[in-house]
Amino acid sequence: MKNKRYIIRILLVFFFFAVTVSSCKKDEEPDYNYFVSNELAASYSTVSMTSMLNMVSEYYPEIGTMESYIDDDVNVYKIVYKTTIYEDEIEASGLVCVPATPGEYPVLSFQNGTNTLNSDAPSEYPTDIFYQLIEYIASMGFVVLIPDYPGFGSSVQIPHPYLIKEPTVQSIVDMFHALNEVGATKFPGLTVKNEYYLLGYSQGGWATLALHKALDTDYPEFNLAGSACGAGPYNLYNLLTEMTGYSTYSMPSYICYIINAYSVYNQFTNPVSDILNEPYATNLSSLYTGTLSLNQINAQLTTSIPGLFKSEFLSGFTSSLSYSTVRQALINNSISPWVTLKPLFFGHGTGDTHVSVTATESMYNAMIAAGTSSAICQKVLYPDLDHGDAVFPFIIDGIQFLLDIRDN
């Protein structure tokens, strides 16, 4: 009798243990390949978005044209996902902006311009007025993605690979993968439509064109619909050749950002001391740690090109064997022209003193010469507008260009 009771107890304990383990397994997260986590970062009603657009349009009248497209409330999430930088896995982050009404929506990915402050990264500051205006695009019937880029947000511990093509493109493509992997599981009511639109300005214009080409040629699983690229430094070799020909340049932080990133990620073999004068060579790595703004970095550099660069570099950059790996790195990370069948829009201010308008004019002409049809590849130049002044005109034109593709 005692043996029977003992066996019953053992069976009950085993049953309880089995049920408990089974229950715990059901509560565990699936083993995602890309997705790590998400959390609600902000929510906007149509009333609040309309009010904000009215306020901003007092300073930038072109923004007012967006108001008629506001059609739904928006929820903004911070997403963390896995990506790689030269085979090293990291966790990257960004924003996913979703219409409040359940449904199937295409994706619009916005690539932001040059930033050096981690506190200004999209997922760190989603309520920044400029980011809000991009987030509002979700109200027009898109899932809007705003990547932080590696080196910001969840990956702030690593240097940002500024204007380095491979990790930039990879990080955005992996954000696409993460979104598709979870869909409605993590974003209630959302079905992701296989239709991708791209928009970006400055560094983001370069990233957008690089991504457009990558989706065109390397990632057929993503159905690219069209892209709008603003004021990007598409040919980096030409950019640095032009900049080193100036006597002064108002944004030395841009030039040194390239040199720092290319040095850290072994894009060229020269030590920084081969390129920059002191104390700038020694101090360079301490400037790009995510804690200083572009203006603060400019203050620790010099606007004098002969003062910033070694004289040997200025005289030998385009021809000397000593700088061949520097030249090749810039060429490798430039975007070569190709034939695209997907609609493409270029915009640039003719008075741009940061990234010369010749960058866009040359890229557009090269795309047409390569065989891309002028019927799908458009270019708009904004008379006399400098780099910052052309942002809003381009963004409005770019959004309209993408809406026309979607709706026609």
Image: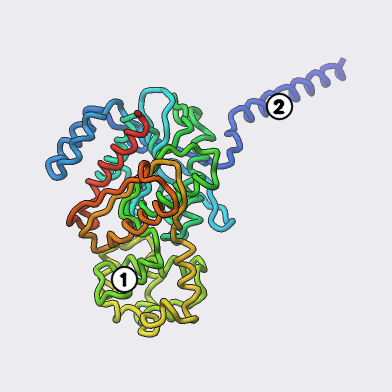
Frontmost residue, 8 versus 73: 73
Residue that protrudes farthest toward the left in the picture:
58
Q: Which corner quadrant holds the N terminus?
A: top right
Q: Position of residue 41 (x, y in %)?
A: 36, 38
Give the answer, above or below, for where 212 lies relative to 290: above
Mark 1 residue crowding within 10 angstroms, few (<14) / some (14–19) / many (20+): some
Q: Is residue 403 placed above or below 335 in the rendered structure?
A: above
Residue appearing at x 41%, y 81% in the figure: 316
Examine the rendering and report whether any part of residue 92 can be seen: no
Query: What number is the disc on residue 17?
Result: 2
Residue named by callout 1: 243
The answer, for residue 218, to whether it is visible in the render is yes
Q: Residue at x 33, y 60 (%)?
A: 359
Residue at 15% x, 40% y is: 57
The amino acid at mark 2 is Phe
Of the residues shown, which amino acid type is indicated by label 1?
Answer: Met
Residue 343 in picture, x, y percent from top left: 39, 41
Q: Nearer the viewer, residue 355 or 46?
A: 355
Label 1 element class: helix
